[in-house]
Amino acid sequence: MKTFLKENLRIDLDQPSTKKGIALVGAGIALATGNPEFLTATVTDAGVQYGGLIGTVVPLAMGLWEAFRKEWD
């Protein structure tokens, strides 16, 4: 997926600024649609702090994926 985004859409997920931008766009969309409880994002010197339902569930799901996935090396 990273390769597809980088080659076709020129979105490099390895850059911290890209992650911050995606988080802020998502939080803006949630706020604009009247659902700020779904995703909140705060940018600090330490990085992006996520909150809300999506901000809690996505890192949990990613952590479970990383813990249980099978490496294809």
Image: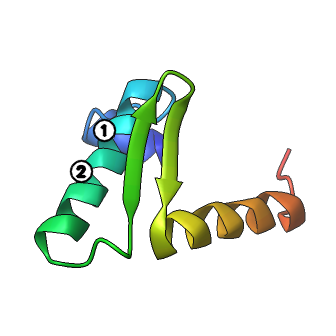
Left or right of 15? Residue 46 is right
Q: Could you tell me how far apart the alpha carbons at marks 1 and 2 are, in whole angstroms?
A: 6 Å
Residue lying at 24% horizontally and 50% vertically, measured from the top left? 25
User: Label 2's element?
Assistant: helix
Query: Which quadrant holds the C terminus?
Result: top right
**Is 19 placed above or below 58 here?**
above
Left or right of 61? Residue 44 is left
Q: Which amino acid type corresponds to the residue marked 2 in the rendered image?
A: Val
Q: Can residue 3 be seen in this view?
A: yes
Residue lying at 51% horizontally and 29% vertically, measured from the top left? 14
Is disc 1 in contact with disc 2, using a CB cutoff of under 8 Å?
A: yes
**Rendering quarter of residue 21:** top left
Q: Mark 1 points at which residue?
A: 21
Q: Which mark is residue 56?
A: none
Residue lying at 64% horizontally and 60% vertically, measured from the top left? 59
Where residue 35 appears, as percent x and y from the top left, is 25, 78
User: Label 1's element?
Assistant: helix
